[in-house]
């Protein structure tokens, strides 16, 4: 790293508060007892579907990184003084100098770092780089030690980060740094203005509980020429990502340091043979069923989690800290390599404060160095997302609607009812297949391989429902193209206590080689509570099918479970737009949980509810979000996760529906004024009763 080689300026060049900060280290402590509660794996279902050109491929040792960072401070501060800049003699803006926090679980470890050095070093680094020629202190950055969950939460790991300290202000023109913004030169001003948009996190810190397990996560981090990235373990259906790769810094400490370690051989060895998914995969091999035991924490999983956060936030620096030990990592995007430092003792390392000033200086320098390239990358990324979104366009409907011969407005009808009911070929094919391959294709998800789901629930489509269906044989692991279903998920369209809903496409191959497509939605549930609710929802659809009730109910194509993670998926048709979305599209300020409709629309929804009740089911969650209308005015009721088989609740359903889909007669009589007043009273009463949604 080029620059003056002079030693750190003499101590009296710094105000006492800054000198104290540079000389400090984190408090020493003995390991605390491990938490008695089991630790969950940090990796989610989604974490297995990161695009192949973004994942971590190798971890390499970063020799003398701590010394390099400390030297970088000497260079930067020397240049600061040589240019005639000074640190203000006024009180350092937010020196908290350690709050005596008892470190045990991860959040307290993060707080200890933030209070001892993190906040103040971020401020000091911002002063040196962003506004060295302005003689006052301004709060530009703040260090967030992790998402707070309450004093009783015994978290094993938390993710901290330095963030722009104007995150709570509506716009850059209004926040409290306006005075500073007016004094910055144009180039620096542009970077600071763009920080909230381009750099919501400037770096990624992973804090572990200060326990024996937590300390082992940092101490035992592996160096691996080939990192064992956890992904979906289906074989024979790999795909190469078409997403653009993010840029590294063209200069600065991180670039110079990585360039000094990389070789031509290591760069050339990172190429990956392209194997794009083309739909003509001959056969796939699903992973074997394995009993899921208690999770045993492994440092590689937390490295992968931190790398994914760095992908999401586009960060270069990853730091791992357990309260006593630490490792500093540099993310090299082009080679998909993490350069990881030796183990650092946070209590006994000389110049720990100086070293971490070097970390924060390098972080801000990286933000500046990558600013222009990152703006171009964001534009390229936006085009890629637009192209990806077009894949899930509704422009090619899977089911043709009857053509009307007149211009009259069609009446409201029940979805999946009447003489025009048809079952498509793709629905028939899918109903008989027990294996589902699930891919993700949105944002930075572009599945290198699909997840293998096994059918655990029948299709509930009229004419295809089978109360007894063939489960996949545990011994059978190889499936030909015409034996499985493929589904590609787009961005989430909703989420809640039951799970996350994605827009999706079913795609499958027939025996004669034809590829059939069908638009759908997929609801995923991950934890035990959500899975129980989603199972209850499927059981309700299953029960309705056994009773022959298909009208006003969306078509359900099956219930599936992921072999790798146990995630469950409910696959169904998209029933249209909810009454809430329809109303909100007209008025974005709409906040009530009812709509006023004509008599026909109220009657059709009441009729739909009567059919559901006729099967012995009470819905118990009637609200605007669960009442759908499609483009041809077919209505349906969805979300049966709260359904019960007790018709004592049916009257509550009817009353709730009547107060949600409200019909107000429009009588023209001599007493119109009094009736209008009565209607207004009725509406006010509804508003008082329901409140805002």
Image (cartoon, rainbow, N blue to C red):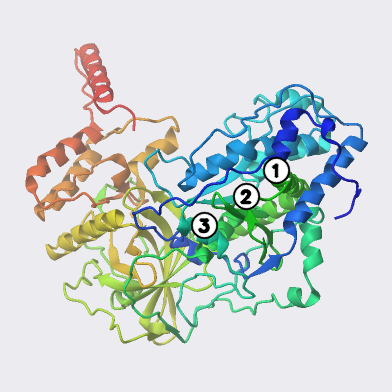
Q: Report the quarter where the N terminus lies.
A: bottom right
Element marked by disc 3? helix
Q: Residues within 10 Å of mark 1 (few under 14, many from 20)?
A: many
Which residue is under mark 2? 346
Image label count:
3
Compared to residue 384, the image places residue 590 above or below, namely above
Q: Is residue 145 visible?
A: no
State which tag comes first along the sequence, 2 or 3: 3
**Residue in the picture at 18% in, 50% down:** 643
Q: Position of residue 241 (x, y in %)?
A: 60, 69
| 190 relative to 578 in the view: left or right | right
State which tag comes first along the sequence, 3 or 1: 3
State which tag comes first along the sequence, 1 or 2: 2
Label number found at residue 377: none
Which residue is under mark 3? 215
Q: Position of residue 651 (x, y in %)?
A: 10, 40
Q: Hey, which residue is sitting farthest left in the picture?
A: 648
Q: Quadrant of residue 41?
A: bottom left
**Residue in the picture at 89% in, 41% down:** 79
Disc 3 to disc 1, how far (Cα)? 21 Å
Which residue is under mark 1? 353
Q: Pointers 2 and 3 in contact (CB under 8 A)?
A: no
Looking at the image, which is closer to me, 428 or 27? 27
Q: Residues within 10 Å of mark 2 (few under 14, many from 20)?
A: many
Q: Quadrant of residue 335?
A: bottom right
Disc 2 to disc 3, how far (Cα)? 12 Å
Q: Is residue 693 visible?
A: yes
């Amino acid at each position: 790293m080029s620059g003056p080689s002079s030693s750190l300026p003499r101590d009296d060049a710094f105000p006492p508060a800054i000198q104290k900060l540079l000389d400090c280290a984190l408090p020493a402590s003995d390991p605390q007892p491990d938490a008695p509660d089991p630790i969950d794996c940090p990796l989610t279902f989604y974490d297995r579907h990161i695009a192949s050109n973004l994942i971590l491929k190798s971890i390499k040792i970063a020799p003398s990184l701590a010394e390099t960072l400390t030297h970088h401070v000497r260079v930067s501060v020397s240049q600061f003084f040589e240019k005639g800049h000074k640190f203000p003699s006024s009180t350092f803006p937010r020196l908290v100098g350690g709050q005596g926090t008892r470190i045990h679980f991860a959040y307290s470890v993060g707080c200890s770092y933030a209070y001892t050095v993190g906040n103040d070093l971020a401020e000091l680094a911002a002063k040196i780089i962003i506004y060295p020629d302005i003689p006052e202190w301004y709060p530009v950055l703040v260090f967030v030690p992790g998402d707070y969950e309450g004093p009783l939460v015994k978290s094993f790991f938390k993710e901290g980060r330095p963030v722009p300290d104007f995150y709570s202000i509506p716009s850059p023109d209004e926040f409290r740094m306006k005075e500073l913004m007016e004094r910055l030169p144009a180039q620096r001003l542009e970077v600071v203005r763009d920080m909230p948009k381009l750099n919501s996190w400037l770096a990624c810190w992973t804090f572990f509980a200060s326990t024996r397990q937590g300390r082992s996560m940092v101490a035992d981090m592996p160096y691996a020429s080939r990192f064992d990235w956890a992904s979906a373990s289906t074989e024979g259906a790999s795909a190469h990502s078409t997403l653009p790769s993010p840029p590294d810094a063209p200069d600065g400490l991180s670039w110079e340091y990585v360039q000094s370690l990389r070789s031509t051989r290591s760069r050339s060895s990172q190429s990956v043979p392209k194997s794009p998914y083309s739909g003509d995969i001959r056969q796939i091999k699903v992973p074997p069923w394995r009993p899921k035991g208690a999770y045993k924490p492994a440092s590689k999983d937390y490295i992968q989690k931190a790398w994914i956060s760095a992908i999401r936030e586009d960060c270069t620096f990853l730091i791992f800290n357990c309260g006593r030990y630490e490792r500093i990592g540099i993310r090299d995007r082009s080679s998909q390599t993490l350069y990881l430092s030796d183990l650092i003792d946070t209590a006994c390392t000389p110049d720990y404060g100086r070293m971490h000033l070097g970390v924060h200086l390098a972080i801000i320098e990286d933000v500046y160095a990558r600013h222009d390239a990152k703006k171009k990358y964001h534009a390229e990324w936006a085009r890629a997302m637009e192209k990806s979104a077009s894949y899930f366009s509704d422009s090619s409907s899977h089911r043709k609607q009857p053509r009307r011969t007149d211009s009259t407005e069609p009446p409201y009808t029940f979805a999946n009812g009447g003489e025009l009911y048809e079952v498509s070929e793709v629905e028939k094919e899918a109903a008989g297949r027990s294996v589902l391959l699930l891919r993700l294709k949105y944002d930075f998800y572009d599945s290198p391989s699909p997840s293998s789901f096994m059918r655990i629930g029948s299709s509930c489509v009229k004419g295809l429902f089978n109360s007894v269906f063939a489960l996949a044989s545990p011994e059978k692991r190889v499936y030909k193209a015409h034996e499985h279903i493929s589904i590609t998920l787009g961005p989430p369209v909703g989420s809640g206590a039951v799970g996350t809903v994605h827009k999706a496409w079913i795609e499958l191959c027939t025996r004669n080689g034809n590829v059939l497509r069908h638009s759908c939605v997929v609801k995923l549930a991950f934890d035990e509570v959500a899975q129980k609710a989603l199972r209850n929802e499927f059981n309700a659809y299953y029960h309705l099918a056994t009773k022959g009730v298909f009208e006003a109910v969306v078509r359900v194509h099956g219930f599936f479970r992921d072999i790798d993670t146990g995630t469950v998926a409910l696959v169904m048709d998209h029933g249209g737009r909810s009454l809430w979305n329809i109303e909100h599209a007209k008025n974005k300020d709409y906040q009530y949980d009812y709509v006023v409709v004509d008599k026909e629309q109220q009657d059709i929804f009441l009729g739909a509810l009567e059919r559901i009740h006729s099967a012995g089911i009470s819905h118990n969650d009637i609200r605007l979000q669960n009442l759908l209308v499609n483009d041809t005015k077919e209505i349906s009721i969805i979300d049966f996760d709260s359904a019960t088989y007790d018709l004592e609740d049916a009257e509550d359903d009817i009353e709730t529906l009547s107060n949600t889909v409200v019909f107000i007669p429009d009588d023209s009589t001599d007493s119109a004024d009094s009736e209008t007043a009565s209607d207004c009273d009725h509406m006010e009463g509804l508003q008082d009763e329901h409140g805002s949604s």
